[in-house]
Image (cartoon, grey):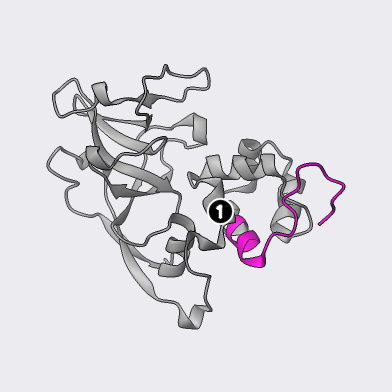
Amino acid sequence: MSSAIANDVDGLPPSVRERLVDVLRAAGAQKPVSAKLGVSVPTLQRILAGSAPIDLNLLYRIAAMSGVDAPSLLSDRAGPHIVDASQADWIDIRTYDLRNITDDGKGVPVASAPFRRDWLNSAFGTDSGLWIAALLSGYPPVGLDEGDRVFLRDIRADELTERQLILWRVRGHLVVGRFSAALRATEPNGEYWVSPPLIGKAEDQLNPIARIMGRPLAVIR
């Protein structure tokens, strides 16, 4: 990797580059992905082929697009190393329809699919309690569009931590926004913040349903 390119993430371990490429491939067609990242399709193709470097600005755009924080994408400590497919352990992840969400639960699953535990732990730091759903509305600040399939994990109000991206329920509708312990205004880029005074189970309060963990890295059909 050339040190002449400013802000290069020099010396990426193979497992980290594989993780980044997996995230990019799982994000969808190359043209919309390149547009979200602010690079050309040929540049994206070179990145996927391992012939173009990933600089810090691009790393953070990949993290924002995937919903996985940048340190987790870079750190080999985010989860176990990727193992050979013949040795991989698999877990079934259920898919739910967000239109069936109520304060009492998610309803019955509409599908399930097997995922590798090592991939889940590497991307999200856990393979426990995960489920999948297609978003009913987008969240442009992190590159999420309506219909995007994402991993989620149930969360309670007392488990919320700063900057987590959360699926909330309010007045019978679902909205996406980040948690902040401090009061914050909605930012010009559309980042929507939810602080403790707004959280609760009253009709006009936001009830946390699940943390949005990121997009699926791989699925066996």
Q: Above or below — where is 203 with respect to 44?
A: above
Mark 1 crowd level (few <14, some 14–19, many ≥20, 10 Å Cα):
many
Q: Is residue 213 magenta?
A: no
Image quarter (top left, top right, bottom left or bottom right) of the N terminus? bottom right
Q: Above or below — where is 50 with respect to 87?
A: above
Q: Residue at x 43, y 62 (%)?
A: 121
Left or right of 68 in this view: 200: left
Magenta-tinted stretch: 1-20
Q: Is residue 218 visible?
A: no
Residue to which mark 1 is pinned:
73
Between residue 143 and residue 182, name the one nearer to us.
182
Left or right of 134 in this view: 84: right
Residue 81 spot, x, y in % from top left? 53, 70
Q: Residue at x 17, y 48 (%)?
A: 107
What amino acid type should be assigned to the residue bearing mark 1?
Leu
In the orientation shown, which residue stands out farthest toward the right? Answer: 4
Q: Above or below — where is 17 with respect to 202?
A: below
Left or right of 96 in this view: 77: right
Residue 146 spot, x, y in % from top left? 42, 35
Q: Residue at x 29, y 43 (%)?
A: 210
Which corner quadrant of the image does residue 185 belong to?
top left
What is the secondary structure assignment of the residue under circle 1? helix
Q: Is residue 17 magenta?
A: yes
